[in-house]
Image: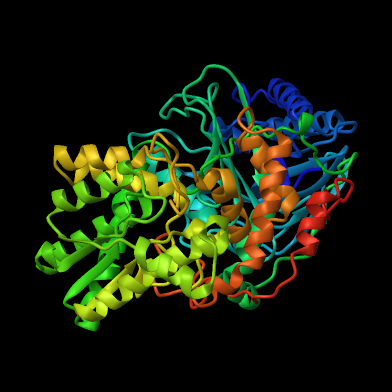
Amino acid sequence: MNYGFVRVAAAIPSVRVANCEYNAEHISQLIAKAEEAQAEVVCFPELSITAYTCQDLFASQQLLDKAEIALIHIVEATRSLNVTAIVGMPVSCDGMLLNCAVVVSGGKIVGAVPKNYLPCYREFYEMRWFASAIKLPPITVMLAGQTVTIDRRQIFETPSFKFGIELCEDLWAPEPPSTQLALGGAEVIFNLSASNDLVGKEDYLNSLLAQQSARLHCGYVYSGCGYGESTQDLVFGGKAMIYENGHLLAEAKRFSLDEQLIFTEIDVERLRSERRTNTTFSASVAKAQRPMANVQCSILNGQWSMVNGQLTRPINPHPFVPEGKDLDERCQEIFNIQVHGLAKRIDHVKCDTLVLGVSGGLDSTLALLVSVKACDLLGRPRQSVVGITMPGFGTTTRTYTNATNLMKQLGITIREISIAEACEQHFRDLGYDPAARDITYENAQARERTQILMDAANQMNGLVVGTGDLSELALGWATYNGDHMSMYGVNASVPKTLVRHLVVWTARHMVDDACRAVLEDIAATPISPELLPADEQDNITQRTEDLVGPYELHDFFLYYTLRHGFAPRKTEFLARTAFAGKYDDDTIRHWLRTFLRRFFQQQFKRSCMPDGPKVGSCSLSPRGDWRMPSDADPAQWIEELNDQTTKRPND
């Protein structure tokens, strides 16, 4: 099974300028290593057979003949290998010399792609030797004893994916050939390059690769010349990178004296999902000038499969939470989106107060912080934020104390309204025995709290600020017409795994020491609705993650189900990879079944959820991102997960 992944490689061979025999030997060795690594396609630098820096030697018939002989040896070396190789060489035809990428697979030359844009400025003067292919129609030549089509618009097809090729400067052009190739169906672009190293150039190149792969929703494999090229005037430090949809997956070490081979997996299924979802891409495909028919690569043994079921690329177990310095930037941006969304709603409805229940938990804490900052932004007094703590049967001293201390530190208006007596009266009215402590016992408390908030808002011309987060909405972990309801839900698209980071970020950057201590203790408190009584030591007995499962797993499932539409088997595989050593396979499968069942069954709650700002790539708003029938059948999703013998297309 490959779950939609394809393994690709970029190689930087050792070269000797104008020594084609030496170069072919090292290219062949790296092709064999790529096959051992189970790469499906391996890409080499521009003019790798001759070296890029041959200059006027490109006019030598001796060099051209030796290059063709070297290609014959490379072709023969691939005859029994299960890998496609893309090598660079000069090709002479019809009075022209073309700078070409030659595709070799299974002992055959599948095709050749000529370079479109020839740099002839500053240190470059390729037009001195080569002809541009911008207006060149497809031509057929004899190359290394085989009939080969040279065409700049070819798309090559393996059993797993389609790819296109451009060469070096083509990427830097205002209209890169890869754009039309991607619109014609190419899912991965290979670039054979010879870009010299200059101060600041690498950052610019990386931005080009990231942007082009993101714009085209494609994989992008780049291989540049390295050690061994002439340093008469320029230095080629050896750059190789593999990108996927704007993200760097693998890169070579620059300025290495050793030849290198990097490889990783590109998730082609994810790229296809992105393209189908993005209507702008689809519209561009419809009006694009289509490339010629696909060219088949004759890989012997079919598609790549994972060695021992393992990926070489990392899978982030917390896809909603960036790593390193990006986390602070992400938290700041999300918090600002929440604040500005709420500020606009306040300004529009002309309310006098913001009303919210403050429990001492993560979600209500984040909503309170957003509310305070929205008032600061609008120049309103913080006293216009009314925090209501509503102790119930399960409220512990820890959460109650944190709630009241936080409100005091933030300087808002505090109200305390116990729900115990009202709920007891309600139970008597219903003829309900509270000793049962079932769903009625729990939901009555949630609805009583919501009633208090709504009526208090009416009393004070207020707006009820919702606290529920994206993860709770996905699981339906909210009481219908209880905490499910508000007048504006500021956390509606913030997943639980990110809520904690936002609270901690706020503690570090936006409050004083006293308030920071409270926020840090809230972040360390177990997640709980506190609807069941505490134990004898006043500890929380009702832990949400014991009931519905670890939120980090559910957020992982949510991301790949919602953002990419992956089937359960693939989501399960990714989770096993991401959480290896933390959760066993049975645990992951159990909670994935729970997620799927709840995600389908609880859609009716999302169909009527309140307004709230979208902050990231995933949202469950029925007005914006997610439109799902409330009675969709989850049977096929769960059956696929249960049936371990089931194979999907491309498995």
Percent of width and height locating residue 583: 64, 33
Rendering quarter of residue 252: top right
Residue drawn at point x = 52 percent, y = 74 percent = 430
Say left or right for 110 vs 181: right
Say left or right for 27 vs 146: left
Percent of width and height locating residue 2: 77, 43
Q: Is residue 262 above or below residue 291?
A: above
Q: Note whether residue 87 is visible.
A: no
The N terminus lies in which quarter of the figure? top right
Say left or right for 204 vs 194: left
Percent of width and height locating residue 581: 63, 27
Residue drawn at point x = 44 percent, y = 71 percent = 426
Rendering quarter of residue 27: top right
Q: Note whether residue 383 is visible.
A: yes
Q: Is residue 432 above or below residue 520?
A: below
Residue drawn at point x = 71 percent, y = 45 percent = 590
Tell me how many marks there are. Answer: 0
Quick one: 390 or 259, which is closer to the camera?
390
Please name the colour scheme applied to the rendered image. rainbow
Percent of width and height locating residue 15: 61, 23
Say left or right for 187 vs 524: right
Residue that sits furthest to the top in the current view: 257
